[in-house]
Amino acid sequence: MMERNAVKREIPSRIDGYGYTSEKLFEGAFARRPSGCHAGPRIRAAVPGVGSKLAGGVHEAIMASGLKSGMTISFHHHLRNGDYVVNQVIQACAELGISDLTIFPTALFDVHKAIIPYIKSGVVGRIMGSVNGAIGKLVSEGGLDAPVVLRSHGGRPRAVISGDVHIDVAFIAAPTADRAGNISGQMGRSACGSIGYAFTDAQNADVVVAITDNLQSYPISPVSIPGVHVDLVAVTDSIGDPAGIVSGTTRVTRDPMRLLIAKYASRLIEASPYFMVGISFQTGAGGIPLAVTAFMKEAMKRRDIRGSFGLGGITGYFVDLMKEGLVQKLMDVQSFDLDAVHSIASDPNHIEISADWYANPWNCGAAVNMLDVVILGATEVDVDFNANVNTEADGALLHGIGGHQDTAAGAKLTIIAQPLMRGRIPCVVDRVHTVTTPGEVVDALVTEFGVTINPQRKDLADACAEFAASRDIPLVPIDELAERARRMSGPMEPIRVSDRVVAVVEWRDGTVIDVIRQLEK
Amino acid sequence: MRRTMLYLPGNNPNMLLRGHLFEPDGLVIDLEDSVSAGEKDSARILVREVLRRGEFGACEVTARINGTDTEHWRKDVQAVVSCGASGVRVPKVESPQTVRDLDEEISGAEAQAGIPQGSVKIFCLLETAFGVWNAYDIAKASPRVTAIIPGGEDLAADLRTSRSREGTELEWVRRMLIVVARAAGVDALDTVFPHVSDDDGLRREANFVKQLGYDGKSVVHPNQIPIIHEVYAPTEREIDNARRIVEAASAAQARGLGAVSVDGRMIDAPVIRRARFTLVRAGLASDSESKG
């Protein structure tokens, strides 16, 4: 039986491997409120002078953790496409005869395609977390028995703290650790800066294993995750490839179309009521967002406006903004490049924050709630401003949610900036293939053809109209934009899917906003 | 205004549909060098379709056709004129006869398409020493000729040299052609600056040709447009001065006075024209007002 949620998506009332959905259909961005108390981990007690947390290597740590078949294990993705830890742990589990694991990573990258044979052999039975690249493709084609559950950066800690997901063992890649299990991401050959995505796992898993290639004498400083949460420390030759962990210096794009989109987005921000002293923003590391930051920097200097904080994934570009006094603080859940890693290790105004602090909708106020402006991307946006960041034009699951839902919900001005077409594939459509973020929290779409404002934000349209008189912001209604995309692309063949659900997209509050169905071969 | 005329490859739908978004003053849809020999027909069909859509914002839309020594040029003219291009840029013009032949072909195409005779303009690319030498006769060969443009790479090769960042090899040609253009009453448009990542070099060259008197430059990359517009933008002082001259001229005209005086200095007609044009460049008046 199908039920329809608040963004008009047909959701099966029961999904094999996920459960009943009737009580958790998406009702609206802020509709569902929590009740009850936090879930929690097993209580442990370390007796002075008894035992050691140093477990040896990965195999020994897995054995010492008590991990058994059918349990749930978690990972963080701070080492991004350079991560070795997920592959090492899954391979070791296979060698130890452990199977049917639920893996609960914050995200998987292309480097993790090495676990595909273990998915096929049953070592990994289920994935709850963002899947990118090859594993996403495998899932889309029906390669896993249970559907993948996709959660946002804020939805994931919410799921842990509220008890939707219980982590049996958290494996935390630790660029630096000591024998008491204190962990830092800021030092070591595999330094990645912030390790904010791992905090909630460390606080809520029954067993926490730090895996490090840089064991230092006790106590290290600074400490990101204190050893009070950590049961075991495993030492391995290498936890990752530095080249895949952080990028070099991030440069602003010279692609003229992206620059044009960024210019319009920046003008929209300048026209908005939020462009004032104390403005806070999140722009991320992509080509367009970084260029928006560059244009905003010019505008801030021109109008002598100093911002309060930059949020989210932090790049060297943001570090420079802080050095120039254009923002006062950086709140960093993920450091994208070497400059950001160096900055978080040396500047007290560069603050490491957890995913919970960053984006969880069910705490006493996440950082996204303090955000004025966010620039996001999407693979598609529809005429209701619903955004899809999960599936590609061919319907394949290729991307996680990231902080998309959380920042869109939290920020006062949510802008999706993207070209109208990618090749000949339209990015503005009548109906997105997958709803990741509902149109009610998307305020504007910016393409190379101009700025398209959600009709619900009349205030913004008025501000732009006033501003346009002197500074030229082309305003394009959404229907006109969709029609233009249609004319440019010509007819598109519809995506053919079966009834089987291969992934469930949860809204940040744990309700089901959409499902992704298996692609027909 | 023709401060910037952006070349768009005639075989690239992506650029053809978006070129105007970068707000150059004009577009040059290219059927010549950016289209390989085997693609000439398909590019012409694509260009025709894009021209028919007519979505080019406020840009002047022209097309660079293949040379009159090729088998393609007549088909190019028929295609672009019938679909609404307002100008034809013709490469390697060496003699007035080339212009007369082109004029005749365009007249035929205008008649066939029901377009008023003479509305499609000719932009002459002078890419050989012989063409440069004949520049005045070329510019006067037809009332359709609206601009002359020195060549870049081809001209340097014909001069038996190569292009340098400093532009030494083109300097004399540039100086000569501005005099020719003014004598013939047509625009002088400069050739492209090919180093698309060298913003400082572009700014230097644009400043140089602007000072010589050029009306603008051809551009090969959208990122070059704002730099050239910035170079051509009048200063606050120039705008203020121009405004006062235009106001004084209007006041004098209203009172039926022939002579105009600003700050105790008599102002004649060319200065008033120049002042009006300054306001156009500053975006404070329309092109038609400057000609009026």
Image (cartoon, coloured by chain):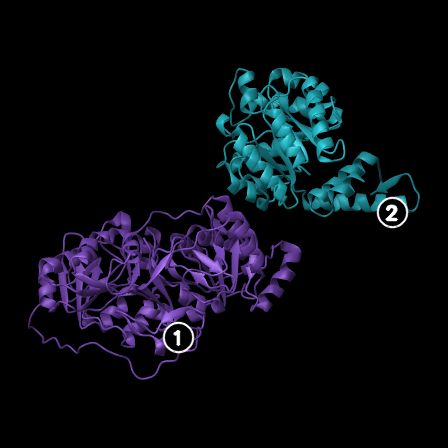
Chain colours: A purple, B cyan
Q: Mark 1 points at which residue?
A: A365
Q: Which residue is drawn at 25% across and 49% down?
A: A242
In what element is the residue under mark 2? helix
Q: Can residue A337 be seen in this view?
A: yes
Image location (x, y in percent) of residue A111: 25, 51
Q: Residue at x 66, y 57 (%)?
A: A469
Q: Which residue is drawn at 54% across and 33% down?
A: B43
Of the residues shown, which amino acid type is indicated by label 2? Ala
Q: Is residue B55 above or below residue A204?
A: above
Q: Which of A90 and A244 is in front in this view?
A: A90
Q: Which of B268 and A348 is in front in this view?
A: B268
User: In the visual, does B221 lie left or right of B102?
Assistant: left
Q: Can residue B215 be seen in this view?
A: no
Q: Picture quarter containing residue A203?
A: bottom left
Q: Please state the chain letter of the residue tagged with numbered disc 2 in the rendered image.
A: B
Q: Picture quarter containing residue A85?
A: bottom left
